[in-house]
Image (spheres, helix red, strand yellow):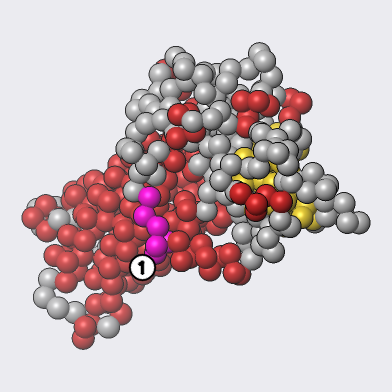
């Protein structure tokens, strides 16, 4: 049996919030107040650093007065560890931290990572890549079914029925595979705290504390295989082990499962079905599964045999409406998961934008199916095909942002006023 879920049980560690009072909180703000993992004296230089530990901080490092952590359930699923940094005030720094990651320079570095780093062992990265690939296929499909209506001279033989039907089947299948990975990611969230930052004492006159990415026990860091223990479980314990109260189980406990394929019924009742993120992933998978039916019936040999209006409505258009509705619900829940209140948008959070674009994409797919019931009307056919077009592009934008997010494991934001970190 896995260790109890701990992030929202330590009342002294932070204030919890979330969009729904009847579900688990989704955000927890934590003050950073701990001793360094290892202290070093002048006789014991920092291992691997040599004389660098005695040198002034690098220009890239930021002298900070305060550091705060914000735990989000979405970040937890993605293996991300966000911190707020309050710059030094009146020349009294306490910490040295990496620079903010939401600047233009750092964003460009993040974009470069998308084309230079391929962590195939990271399920969150695979989710993003699969949905990006599926969205590209749907964009191609949208050209097949909409462009001939917009510009008839561009149409080639059987473009809408054959090219459109086959690409729809491929796109729906890829979305289904991505949704399965999304559920696998959801049930393997970190069930105990993982701070994700190592702290060391800097050999300076002031005795600053330096924060560096490290000590993560999420499965995302396991490079040997997709399903297994995080690397930190095999080396040193994470920072949270030292911070946790004695009556709380350690995240490195031998009884903690680091990977599961199916949660138990008890876990479903007591935890997962109360998580906004899990419900969003579940809605996505149900929607994708029903939507796949319309992708299957879009194949020319099958669609050609749906000769009656009732058959087309039941086997082709209805699954699009039901499946698209699942996408709408999923995108909405993903947005709400990142918000402190259900009525307060969080436009400075990457996950919020991902949910928003997926919501719009789901509306497009749902609208296509709904207009399909009136396929005898040429105007409805055109608008339905157009809805597939812009809906596909919205899914692609959301998937690309999710790709960027999956590689940004340690976001840092300089915080001077109340707000969110991306």
Taking the view exactly as shown, the residue that stands out farthest to the bottom is 153
Residue depicted at x 27% and y 68% = 140
Residue that badge 1 annotates: 389
Residue depicted at x 8% and y 55% = 301
Does residue 115 belong to the magenta stretch? yes
User: Local crowd at mark 1 within 10 Å, few (<14), some, or many (≥20)?
Assistant: many
> Which SS class for mark 1?
helix
Q: Quadrant of residue 148?
A: bottom left
Left or right of 124, for residue 293: left
Q: Tell me the magenta residue range.
A: 114-119
Residue depicted at x 76% and y 26% = 12
Q: In which quarter of the image is residue 24?
A: top right
**Residue 391, visible in the rendered structure:** no
Residue depicted at x 44% and y 34% = 230
Left or right of 262, for residue 99: right
Q: Where is residue 305 shown, x and y percent of the image? A: 9, 53
Taking the view exactly as shown, the residue that stands out farthest to the front is 43
Q: Where is residue 171 shown, x and y percent of the image? A: 26, 56
| Residue 14 or residue 372, whichever sits in front | 14
Location of the C terminus (image quadrant):
bottom right
Location of the N terminus (image quadrant):
top left
The correct choice, above or below, for 141 with respect to 285 in the image is below
* Total marks placed: 1
**Residue 289, visible in the rendered structure:** yes
Q: Where is residue 35 shown, x and y percent of the image? A: 73, 33
Q: Quadrant of residue 19?
A: top right
| Residue 166 or residue 266, whichever sits in front | 266
The correct choice, above or below, for 31 with respect to 96 in the image is above
Does residue 351 belong to the magenta stretch? no
Left or right of 193, for residue 227: left
């Amino acid at each position: 049996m896995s260790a109890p879920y701990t992030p929202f049980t330590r009342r002294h560690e932070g204030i919890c919030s979330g969009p729904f009072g009847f579900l688990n909180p989704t955000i927890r703000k934590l003050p950073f107040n701990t001793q360094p993992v290892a202290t070093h004296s002048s006789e014991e230089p920092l291992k691997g650093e040599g004389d660098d530990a005695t040198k002034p901080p690098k220009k890239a490092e930021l002298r900070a007065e305060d550091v705060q952590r914000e735990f989000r359930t979405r970040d937890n699923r993605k293996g991300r560890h966000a911190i707020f940094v309050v710059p030094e005030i009146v020349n009294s720094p306490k910490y040295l931290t990496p620079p903010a990651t939401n600047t233009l320079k750092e964003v460009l570095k993040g974009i470069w990572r998308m084309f230079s780093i391929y962590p195939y062992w990271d399920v969150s990265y695979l989710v993003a890549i699969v949905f990006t690939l599926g969205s590209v296929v749907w964009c191609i499909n949208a050209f097949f079914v909409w462009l001939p209506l917009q510009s008839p001279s561009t149409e080639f033989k059987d473009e809408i029925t054959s090219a459109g039907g086959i690409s729809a089947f491929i796109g729906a299948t890829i979305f289904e595979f991505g949704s399965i990975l999304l559920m696998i990611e959801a049930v393997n969230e970190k069930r105990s705290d993982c701070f994700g930052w190592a702290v060391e004492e800097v050999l300076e006159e002031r005795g600053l504390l330096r924060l560096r990415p490290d000590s993560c026990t999420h499965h995302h860091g396991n490079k040997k295989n997709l399903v297994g223990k995080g690397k930190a479980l095999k080396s040193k314990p994470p920072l949270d082990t030292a911070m946790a109260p004695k009556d709380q189980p350690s995240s490195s406990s031998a009884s903690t499962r680091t990977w599961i394929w199916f949660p138990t019924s008890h876990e479903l009742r007591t935890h997962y079905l109360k998580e906004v993120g899990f419900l969003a992933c579940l809605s996505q998978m149900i929607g994708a599964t029903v939507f796949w039916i319309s992708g299957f019936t879009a194949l020319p040999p099958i669609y050609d045999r749906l000769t009656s209006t009732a058959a087309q409505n039941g086997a082709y258009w209805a699954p699009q409406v039901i499946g698209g509705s699942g996408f709408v619900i999923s995108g909405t829940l993903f947005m709400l998961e990142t918000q402190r209140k259900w009525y307060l948008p969080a436009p400075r959070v990457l996950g919020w934008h991902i949910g928003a674009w997926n919501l719009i994409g789901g509306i497009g797919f749902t609208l296509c199916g709904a207009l399909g019931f009136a396929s005898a009307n040429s105007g409805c056919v055109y608008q339905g095909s157009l809805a597939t077009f812009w809906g596909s592009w919205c899914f692609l934008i959301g998937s690309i942002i999710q790709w960027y997010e999956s590689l940004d494991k340690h976001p840092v934001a300089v915080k001077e006023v109340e707000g969110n970190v991306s």
